[in-house]
Image: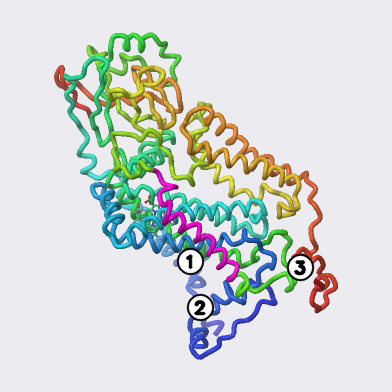
Amino acid sequence: MSFPWAKQYTPANGLTKFLDEKLPLPRLVYNAVGAGYPVPRNLSYFWNFGVLAGFFLVLQIVTGVILAMHYAANAQVAFATTEHIMRDVNWGWMMRYAHANGASFFFIVVYIHIFRGLFYSSYKAPREMIWLLGVVIFLLMMATAFMGYVLPWGQMSFWGAKVITGLFGAIPLVGEPIQIWLLGGFAPDNAALNRFFSLHFLLPFVIAGVVILHIWALHIPGSSNPTGVEVKSESDTLPFHPYYTAKDGFGLGVALLFFFALVFFLPNALGHPDNYIQANPLSTPAHIVPEWYFWPFYAILRAFTMDFILPAKLWGVLGMFSAILCWFFLPWLDKSPVRSGHYRPLFRKFFWFGLIPTMAVLFWCGGAPAEEPYVMLSQIATAYYFLHFLVILPIVSQIEKPEPLPYSITEAVLGSDKKAVLGENTEPAV
Amino acid sequence: MADTAATANPDSVAENEDGYRRRDFINIAAVSAAGVGGAAVLLPLISQMAPSKDVLAESTTEVDVSAIEPGQAIKAVFRKQPLFVRRLTPQEIAAADAVDPSSLRDPQTLEERTKEGHTDMLVTMGVCTHLGCVPLGAAEGEVRGEFGGYFCPCHGSHYDTAARIRKGPAPSNLLVPEYEFTSDTTILVG
Ligand code: HEM
Ligand code: FES
């Protein structure tokens, strides 16, 4: 499970000796995130975001459990109890702003984490399972955040719930019964609000469970690194503690600076003012938009405007879900033996000049009203999005000639790797 | 040790000449009973999420339509969803009748969407058939879209004066609920 040169855990005192025999939790920690876990020595700051995501999951659970102590999931009072949290509960405003912005930061961090995976093709063998579990986590996060946003029972909460459950109505024949079943009524009301609260409370713990599997799967091959060259010898690695605990700690400090700047000075910058109006089933806000982190997928949903065999609405729903589901096939669509985008000239061009601008356009269009030119732009971007993953990536990965890779991580860092090349037990030349 | 284990192993006992063991029957019976039981438990687990009796009980609504002037519309509530009742002007009726139904996405005539003798009274759900927003156009001063009926701002669906879908992503016309005129001035919906 780890490299042969990993440091071994030795219990230091009576208590840890006792624990090591009865329940070796300190050993688990030592081997998982301590000195007993060797990690490539060349990880860049892009490798901080997994730990950051874990931090924001914990933050959401802590602030969420606190909010749940003061909130009541009843359509009559949900909006009022949210305002009660904001005005009456000691520090309630801080808990709620931390939870709402925590959700945004969780997504920012996870998007960067996914971006890292895409550029360095971290999804490739032997790390497919880590990637697949990651996509599962992302889907669960989307469901959790969607249901959380319904809880304050503002206008956007209500109409978001209506539009998103309306997606199921697109399924032929069984669609409408499914929608009514999901909502427990003909429109979002008490029944829907209550079940969303129940699931919103549950799902983060399910996510925590999948995160454990994700990290378990990671610890089998260990982390990849910016060169994509696998670890060959001890000089390629450093113990996680203290090297990466320090680096992750520094990264967390920087992330928290941004986070609290938002929580304390711009707490509503990422939210929507309409959600401070209580839900009104008889009046739709002029411009319904989901939270920013759903924009690219919302743009794909709205890009399908023409009936073609199936109704346009169903195409939109299929398109939106396939945009994420196609990630499950990525480890097999990208056939290049080289991982890191740094050594893949053609891949790199399509990545920076194809995929990234496409995502930017989808983001922008998803938050814009359903008018021209946004509709046409989202159509072009949606077409490229699927083309990129399903056609360009498989072809590019087969025809491109990768640039020469360094022999080892040590060579990439130090310029030469005597120890690995000569098999000597000497310090590498600096 | 080895032969005590062999005789204690229930799988190895009493195999008859066809290769069946008496244990097989118990295994299959037990697993089937557990399977049927498990499947039966799913029913309440799924069905509890369907609309409860109190939600279903609110399923009819009476609306007084006497005060609606031609060209005006009102919003009522039916099953916690908006209901549009609109009295059409002669021009609006003419505009609706002027289109060839076969050219429509969801072909229907105004006659089919209204009650006999009341073609000027258009009763529809105020729920866009795309993803369920409330279209604009029922209240005074709201935009009515390119075809003078209703306009859904969520993703830009335009409905005509018979509330038929003419442009945009919605797949079908605004739904006409089941209703009847209980008198000349009231309708009972549901
Ligand atoms: C995966 C982690 C989580 C995410 C992404 C998330 C996301 C959200 C979002 C976006 C909102 C709406 C915030 C607003 O507009 O004010 C919300 C509200 C809420 N969440 Fe969470 N949440 C998470 C975990 C939790 C947990 C673990 C609990 C409780 C055990 C919880 C309890 C609540 C409550 C009570 C509200 C309603 C109060 C309010 O709107 O401020 N959440 N959540
Ligand atoms: S909900 Fe009306 S156009 Fe989408």
Task: Please identify the residue farthest to the right as the structure is shown.
Answer: A422
Determine whether the beta carbon of the residue marked 1 sits less than 8 angstroms from the nearest atom of ligand 1.
no
Q: Which mark is residue A25?
A: 2
SS class of the residue under badge 3?
Answer: helix
Span highlighted in magenta in the image: A245-272
Separation (CA) of disc 2 from disc 1: 46 Å
Residue A317, image x and y in percent?
A: 48, 37
Q: Residue at x 64, y 64 (%)?
A: A223
Q: Is residue B144 above or below residue B61?
A: above
Mark 3 sits on what residue? Answer: A410
Vertical side of A407 occupied by A153: above or below: above
Front in this rendered view, residue B119 or A248: A248
- Predominant secondary structure in magenta? helix
Q: Which quadrant would the C terminus of chain A be assigned to in this image? A: bottom right
Amino acid under label 3? Thr
Q: Position of residue A132 (x, y in %)?
A: 57, 55
